Amino acid sequence: MTVAELCGQLQSLANEGYGIHAVELLTECDSCTSDVVVDNPRLEILRSDKGTVKLLFRNEDHDD
Protein backbone atom coordinates (compact mmCIF):
# COMPACT_ATOMS: atom_id res chain seq x y z
CA MET A 1 0.00 0.00 0.00
CA THR A 2 1.32 3.43 -0.86
CA VAL A 3 1.20 6.40 1.53
CA ALA A 4 -1.48 8.00 -0.65
CA GLU A 5 -3.58 4.83 -0.44
CA LEU A 6 -3.12 4.72 3.32
CA CYS A 7 -4.29 8.32 3.66
CA GLY A 8 -7.28 7.63 1.42
CA GLN A 9 -8.29 4.57 3.43
CA LEU A 10 -7.93 6.43 6.73
CA GLN A 11 -10.08 9.28 5.38
CA SER A 12 -12.72 6.78 4.22
CA LEU A 13 -12.80 5.19 7.67
CA ALA A 14 -13.14 8.62 9.31
CA ASN A 15 -16.01 9.45 6.95
CA GLU A 16 -17.73 6.22 8.06
CA GLY A 17 -17.43 7.32 11.70
CA TYR A 18 -14.45 5.21 12.74
CA GLY A 19 -11.84 6.60 15.11
CA ILE A 20 -8.30 5.34 15.45
CA HIS A 21 -7.60 4.65 19.10
CA ALA A 22 -4.71 2.22 18.68
CA VAL A 23 -2.18 1.33 16.02
CA GLU A 24 -0.90 -2.23 15.81
CA LEU A 25 2.40 -2.71 14.04
CA LEU A 26 3.27 -6.24 12.97
CA THR A 27 6.70 -6.66 11.48
CA GLU A 28 7.96 -9.86 9.92
CA CYS A 29 11.34 -10.95 8.64
CA ASP A 30 12.80 -14.30 7.65
CA SER A 31 12.98 -15.76 11.16
CA CYS A 32 11.23 -13.27 13.48
CA THR A 33 8.04 -11.35 14.12
CA SER A 34 7.24 -8.42 16.35
CA ASP A 35 3.81 -7.16 17.35
CA VAL A 36 3.52 -3.72 19.00
CA VAL A 37 0.32 -1.86 19.94
CA VAL A 38 0.40 1.91 20.46
CA ASP A 39 -2.68 3.19 22.33
CA ASN A 40 -4.01 6.68 21.60
CA PRO A 41 -1.45 7.14 18.83
CA ARG A 42 0.01 10.45 17.79
CA LEU A 43 1.74 10.52 14.44
CA GLU A 44 4.79 12.62 13.73
CA ILE A 45 6.47 12.93 10.35
CA LEU A 46 10.24 13.24 10.67
CA ARG A 47 12.04 14.74 7.67
CA SER A 48 15.67 14.00 6.98
CA ASP A 49 18.12 16.16 5.09
CA LYS A 50 18.45 13.29 2.59
CA GLY A 51 14.93 13.80 1.22
CA THR A 52 13.29 10.93 3.11
CA VAL A 53 10.71 10.81 5.88
CA LYS A 54 9.95 8.50 8.78
CA LEU A 55 6.56 7.98 10.40
CA LEU A 56 6.83 8.02 14.19
CA PHE A 57 3.89 6.69 16.21
CA ARG A 58 3.86 7.66 19.89
CA ASN A 59 1.38 7.28 22.71
CA GLU A 60 -0.67 10.46 23.00
CA ASP A 61 0.49 10.96 26.58
CA HIS A 62 4.21 10.59 25.72
CA ASP A 63 6.31 13.42 27.13
CA ASP A 64 8.37 15.28 24.53
Image (cartoon, helix red, strand yellow):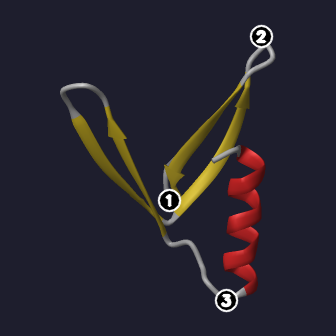
Disc 3 target residue:
17
Disc 1 target residue:
61
Residue 3 is at least partly visible in this image: yes
* Amino acid on which the number 1 mark rests in the picture: Asp
Disc 2 target residue:
50
**First in sequence: mark 1 vs mark 3:** 3
Numbered disc 2: secondary structure = loop
Q: Quadrant of residue 24?
A: bottom left
Residue 64 is at least partly visible in this image: no
The span from disc 1 to disc 3 (Cα, nearest Å) is 24 Å
Where's residue 51, x and y in %? Answer: 81, 17
Where's residue 1, x and y in %? Answer: 63, 47
Closer to the observer: label 1 or label 3? 3
Numbered disc 3: secondary structure = loop
Tell me the residue at 77%/10% (across/down).
50
The span from disc 1 to disc 2 (Cα, nearest Å) is 30 Å
Tell me the residue at 67%/44% (across/down).
44
